[in-house]
Image (cartoon, rainbow, N blue to C red):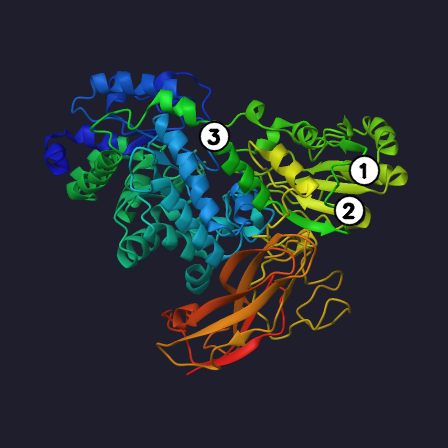
Amino acid sequence: MDIKALISKMSFREKVYQLLQLTSDFFSGSGDVDLTGPIQDFKIAPEDMKLIGSVLNTRSAEDLIAIQKKYIEQNPSGIPLIFMLNVVHGYRTVYPVNLGLACSFDTELVFECSKMAAKEAALEGCSVTFGPMVDIARDARWGRAMESSGEDPYLGAKIAEATVKGFEGDMGKYNLATCVKHFAAYGAAEAGMDYNTVDMSERTLREYFLPTYKAAVDAGARTLMTAFNIVDGIPAVANKHLLCDILRGEWGYKGLIISDFCAAKELMAHGVAEDHKAAAEMVMNAGLDMEMMSVAYINYLEELVAEGRVSLKQIDDAVYRVLKLKEECGLFESPYGHLDLDEAKAVILSEEHRAIARRAAEEGAVLLENDGILPLAESVESIALIGPHTDNGEIIGKWSCMGKPCDTVTVLEGMKKLYTGSRIECARGVFAAFDSKDESGIAEAVKIAERCDTVILTLGEEPDDSGEGRSKMYIDLPDVQYKLLDEIYKVNKNIIVLLFTGRPLSVVRLREKARAVLCAWWPGTEGGNAIANLISGRVSPSGKLAMTFPYSVGQCPIYYNHYNSGRPRPDDQRRYNYKCAYIDGPNSPLYSFGYGLSYTSFSYSEVKLSDTVLKKGGKITASVELTNTGNREGTETVQLYIRDLVGSVTRPVKELRGFERVTLGKDESKVVSFDIDEETLAFYGQDLQRRAEAGEFHIFIGGDSRVSSPAKFTLV
Ligand code: BGC
C-alpha cells in the first residue's frame, strides 16, 4: 500500500489526530477501563472522534469491535484505529509477573509465554502490546520492579529479546507488535519512588540501563514508549539526546515512538515547558510521534507549523510511522486485525496454554530456605493451610490484562488436587494489607495448626501493593503476619512459608521460624497447581533470583554488580570504621542475585580455561563439570561471571556474562562451557567508547552471584 500517497491526500487535521491515542472510554463511554493515569477531560468534539489514531486499553473484544465498527464507517480516509493493550504477563491465560518469570532464567520459556499471550490477544483483535517493560530495577521499594526482569542488564537483554521475538514472530495471524518501555532508565527513580528524579552519568546509563532497550530494538520491536522521568534534567519524552542521538541515530530505530500516559502534558509540572504549546513543540522536536492521553499535538501543531517552529515534514514522518504500523499489523486488510473469536475461544485458557503458564510458575518460583521439610510427601496425614492467599484467585497478580481471579487455580485448589489422601484444613488468619492490624483470625488459625502435621503459611503483600505508583518505604511483612507466624510456631514447628509478592522483601525474620520459604511471586492462572507440584516435589524448584533481596530496606538500592569502592568491607561479621560499610548491619543482602535452592544439590568442579591468554579478536572457553550430588533429578542455572581487575574506569566486582539451565539426573554430570571473547569483556571506557581493555580478568562459574574461586586469564 502506498502510505505516502495516502498521507498526501489527508487534511492537516486528519494528520494530527492520527498522532493521538486515547483510552477506550472516550469511544465507548463505558467509563470502566483501566486508567493508569489521571482522568482527563479533553473536550474533543464528537465529530473529531472519527479522526483519532489509536485506542489504548479496551475492556473486551466486543468493546474493540464496537469501537472500530463505528469509527471505520466514519473515518474520511478509510484509516482504521489501532488498538494497544498492556499484555504484560499474559492475556487471559496469565503467567507469573515478569520479575517471577525472569527468575526462570529460561529464555525459551519466556519466548513461549510471549507467543501464547500474543496469540490470545491477537485473536481478540489487539494489535500492539505495551511491552516488554525492560527497565532495570535495583530498588525493591519501586513497585514496578514487578513488571521488570530485575537488576541485571545481561539477563534483562536476553529476556527482552526473547519477549519481542515471541510476541512479534513473523507478524502473522498470531502475533502482536511490541512496545519496548519505558525509555529510558525509568527503574532508577530516586528512593525507589515512582516517577521520581533519575540522575545518572552517561556511563552508567549506557553500561547498565540502556542495553535492555537496545536488545529489544535490535530484536525488532516496532514501537517504543518513552518514560515519565527526567534523564539528566530533561523529561524522557522530550529528551533529544535519548530519542534522536541514541535511539534513532546510534541504534537506527525506525519504529513508532509513543509517550507514556499524559507525559507530554507533564512537561509543565516538570517545569521545562511553560504551557501546552511549548510542550508540543518540545516533544515533536525531540522526535515523539504519538501522544498517549494528552492533547498538545491536536491543539497546537497547526500554530507551531505556521510559526515555523515545527515542520510539516516532521508531522508527515510521524503520521507515516503510525500508518506504517497499522499496515504491518494488517489493519488496512481488515480493521479487526486477526480477530477470530471462535479460534480465540478454543485457545484461551486451553490445556496447552495452561500448561505453559504452569511451567512458568514452577520455573519462576524461588526456594529461599529449606531444611529438608520440603518436598512434602503426598502421604502426609494433615496440612494446615493458613494465610490470606490460601484460597485467593487474586494470586494471578496485578496487570493481568484480561486474566480473571475466577479462572485462577488457588493454592487450596491445587493442594487438594494433589494431596487427595490428606486432611487439609484452612483459615485466613490475617489480612495481607500492609496496614492491617486485625489479629482476630489468629486464634482459629492456631487451633488448626495445632492439630495438623504440617503448616503451610501463605504470606506476603497484597496484589495491589506492587505495580505502577506502588512505591513502599517498608518492604518487610507487616507485623500482623509475623504475629501469626509466632503464635503458630508455639504449637507447630513444621512451618513452610509461601511468599506472594511483586518485589523483593526484607524477610529476615522468616528464617527464624520457617523451615522452608518458597517465593511464588504472583504466579498467574495456574499458580495453585504449580505450587502444589513444587511442594510435593513432583517438580523440583529451579528459580534463581533476578533481583537481590535486601537484608534491610536501608540497603536499597542494592545489586550484585556494584563497584568495589576504595575501602571495601572485608567481611560482614565485624564492625568496621572507615570502611564502605554499615555500622548496624551487613553489606550483604538477605538473598543474592542468582540465588535459589533445589531439592537436589549440585557440585561444581574448578573452572577450566582453554587458554590463560586471550588475544584480541580471539576466543577462549571456560568450562566446569556440574554434578548432581543429591538424590533426585533437578535443574540448575549455571552462571558465568567476569571481573575485570583493572580498567581505565572502575569495574564491577562481578558481571553476569552467560547462563545455562541444565537438568541432571541423580549422580549425572555435564560439562558446561562458555565462550569468552572481547565482546564478553567490553565496557564503556574513559572516552565512552565500548571496547575490551587489555589486562587481567577473573572468571567465576557457579550457582549464584556469590561464587568465589575464579580462574584467571589475561587479554593481550
Ligand atoms: C504506564 C505504562 C502503560 C500505560 C498504558 C502508563 O501509566 O506507565 O506502562 O503501558 O500507562 O496503560
Q: Disc 1 designates what residue?
A: 454
| Viewer-side residue, 281 vs 243 | 243
Is ligand 1 closer than 8 angstroms to the Cβ of mark 2? no
Three-letter amino acid code of the residue under disc 2:
Ile
Q: Is residue 317 visible?
A: yes
Q: Which mark is residue 401?
A: 3
Quick one: SS at disc 1?
A: strand
| Vertical side of 696 occupied by 109: above or below | above
- Packing grade of label 3 (10 A; few <14, some 14-19, many >=20) is many
Quadrant housing the N terminus? top left
The answer to which quarter of the image holds residue 501 is: top right
Height in image: 80 above or below 206?
Answer: above
- What x and y, as percent, mark residue 685? 41, 72
* Residue assigned mark 2: 373
Tell me the kind of residue under disc 3.
Cys
The first of marks 1 and 2 along the sequence is 2
Q: In the rendered structure, are the residues bearing label 1 and label 3 in contact, judged by CB atoms less than 8 Å apart?
A: no
Q: Earlier in the sequence, mark 1 or mark 3?
A: 3
State if disc 2 and disc 1 touch (CB < 8 Å). Answer: yes
Question: Does the image show residue 235?
Answer: no
Question: Residue visible at 70% across and 53% down?
Answer: 552
**Image location of residue 281, percent across then percent down:** 27, 42
Sequence-wise, which precedes: disc 2 or disc 3? 2
Q: Label 1 amino acid?
A: Thr
- Ligand 1, seen in the image, is in the quarter at top left
Q: Is residue 657 left or right of residue 307?
A: right
On whether ligand 1 comes within 8 Å of the CB at mark 3, the answer is no
Examine the rendered structure and indicate whether residue 2 appears above or below residue 238: above
Q: CA distance from mark 1 to mark 3?
A: 36 Å
In the image, residue 207 lies at what x, y percent?
Answer: 44, 63
